[in-house]
Image (cartoon, rainbow, N blue to C red):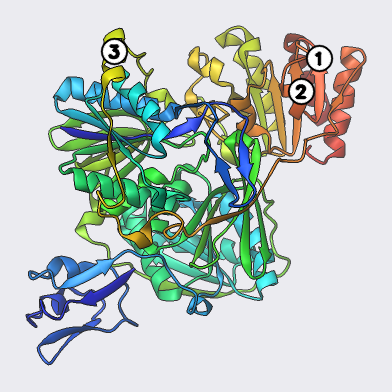
Amino acid sequence: MEIFVCIKQVPDTTEVRINPETNTLIREGVPSIVNPFDENAVEAALQLKEKHGGKVTVITMGPPQAKEALKTTIAMGVDEAILVSDRAFAGSDTWATSYTLSQTIKKLGKYDLIICGKQAIDGDTAQVGPGIAEWLGIPQLTFVVKAEVNGTKLIAERMLEEVNEIVECPLPAVMTVVKQMNVPRLPSLKGMMKAKKAEIKTLSASDIEADAVNIGLNGSPTNVVKIFTPPPKGGGETLSGEPDEIVDKLIAKIKERKII
Amino acid sequence: MSIKILLDKCTGCTLCVKACPFAAIKIINRLAVIDLDTCTLCGACVESCKFNAIELKKELGGSDHDLSHFKGIWVFAEQREGKIQSVAYELLTEGKKLAGDLKTELSAVLCGDPTIEEEVEHLFSYGADKVYLVTHPELKHYHTAPYARAIAEAITKYKPEIMLLGATTLGRDLAARLAIRVGAGLTADCTGLAIENRLLQQTRPAFGGNIMATIQTPKHRPQMATVRPKVFKKIKVESPKKGVVIKFTPALRPEDLLVKLLEIVEDESVKINLAEAEIIVSGGRGLGEAKNFKLIEELAAVLGGAVGASRATVDAGWISAHHQVGQTGKTVSPKLYIACGIAGKIQHLAGMQSSDTIVAINKDPDAPIFKVATYGIVGDLFEYVPLLTRKLQEFRG
């Protein structure tokens, strides 16, 4: 089974900076990690491979330093990691990103299953996984908490608001996974040695034969026009007194606010 | 999207004419000709053609010169088991304001099996001028592909300038697919909407709520956004008009029906859906052990609220993951959020800090939860939670 995992390198800290000219985030110089949900995606891929055989390929679109994130996944045990990197991809929103990743997967050949984390912790959009599915014209199963492959079928349990639903679809398909699915394995010592030596293949916009109108800023219908720090909540009040008094005060406040 | 016949490959064989569900293709001088006004870009002809003579390309919708063809605001009326979800009414209420600013019409799009028609009147009572009623037996239960097919068909035909969906699991799954198909800009999980220079200004938290970003889609239509439930209040209009109902049946195709529902796994512990709740009482590690969630459940019950939980308690197996609030769980925005024994890690705050009123009960005065709390109680939850429950019971009689 040919499994692709799409990952994103995200800033580790809550300290984010903004380029005031382009209104985009400056990712250079910020310590980076593999998006935590994507580690669950890698783990899911490795478990499926262990059961059914095949190959796990990880891809990411990003600047050259995103190689570090790919190396983390090699240390976890994936077979191959590919960086899709080109100045022409800069400024991509989810439209352009999902196009670029889908185009990369198409160029790399046969695919049975594509796994993504449910969303990235920086942008929190959850839009790239379904976007890839649409570009490839294959089914998507999002928010998956359990998955198994049975022959040419994917059977997955999706975690919704109040219930879970178990669905099946034929492969190839895209699935996005939630944190509750598994506990990502730690890199092994052998894996870390392998990662250190690993050559990361890098593909450019022309390597994946990307259509220039669909990538980077050109292929991104949304523009960030303003970034700002949310106004501090403020007005927070610590209620004091005896427990009885405190609770009476609280109930009075809640009533005042017409909540009850 | 755009479609064209590659004239050097077309043989005039008429297969596409037969395949087109909309009778939009004619053979003229032994070549296929597509009537672009009738065509919905469904792609049925592309598959039927044995000569690869029809090219359907996804491309960004609208362009500088034809934006004026896109008019009106659409709200996706999410329904589950035949019942329209509260977020649809919240979006209609907000959509009404936006439609006023744009001097345009507000419409709801309701998909389901034919029995869903009974729900239409509710949409008018929350201000819809028009309802697009999309019915098909395969639309009874939500699956991505048939819904995306149906709504993409409607968007291509009726050209709304704005489309709003709830940022629920369903809304986010659908919107992401739809935006690529129709070539729209899409902004996720918005907490603020406004109109400026006729453009939708979409404000949303990013980086776990540490920054806010305002996003617009200047050159492409529709401008699509998913909006966090409970951020806007739902308000019925005073004298609702019986608006226009536009019915249609989408042309679903076999590849839209590949995903099959096998089973729904109910979670008995979920009494009230977190995302729809006006009041949420959440418990954290401070509860000490699973059985103490009973205190949280009792307080939630007297308030008519839902039970939430921190990640630590879910990981410890004290409560099911459907209750989890935070970045790995649900993002909620109720009128009242009561955090009991929750320290308030950034990931938890990301999931609840847009709540109207936040009450924090925690022994540790330095717990980060107090930074976002409207009212803080520094003390033992085992003392305060039962006391609050009892006094509220007395108050309620």
Which label is found at residue B264?
Answer: none
Q: Amino acid at mark 3?
A: Met
Kindly report the distance in space between the C-alpha atoms of the residues bearing marks 2 and 3. Answer: 45 Å
Query: Same subunit under labels 2 and 3?
Result: no
Kindly report the distance in space between the C-alpha atoms of the residues bearing marks 2 and 1. Answer: 9 Å
Give the residue number, with chain letter if any, for mark 1: B378
Q: Residues within 10 Å of mark 1 (few under 14, many from 20)?
A: some
Q: Nearer the viewer, mark 2 or mark 3?
A: 3
Is residue B31 in view?
A: yes
Q: Which of the image's four quarters has the N terminus of chain B?
A: bottom left
Tag 3 secondary structure: helix
Query: Which is nearer the N-term, disc 2 or disc 1?
Result: 2
Query: Residue B373, how many percent across, how many down?
Result: 77, 28
Kindly report the distance in space between the C-alpha atoms of the residues bearing marks 3 and 1. Answer: 50 Å
Query: Residue B177, how many percent across, how many down?
Result: 38, 53
Indicate left or right for B181 with B17 as reference: right
Q: Quadrant of residue A167?
A: top left
Q: Is residue B139 above or below residue A37?
A: below
Give the residue number, with chain letter if any, for mark 2: B370
Chain label for disc 1: B
Indicate left or right for B27 with A11 as reference: left
Q: Amino acid at mark 1?
A: Val
Q: Which residue: 31% across, 58% down?
A: B137
Tag 2 secondary structure: helix
Q: Quadrant of residue A257?
A: top right
Query: Residue A36, how many percent across, how many down?
Result: 45, 26
Tag 1 secondary structure: strand
Chain label for disc 2: B
Q: Is residue B337 above or below residue B97?
A: above
Q: Quadrant of residue B273?
A: top right
Q: Which residue: 74% across, 39% down?
A: B356
Give the residue number, with chain letter if any, for mark 3: A193
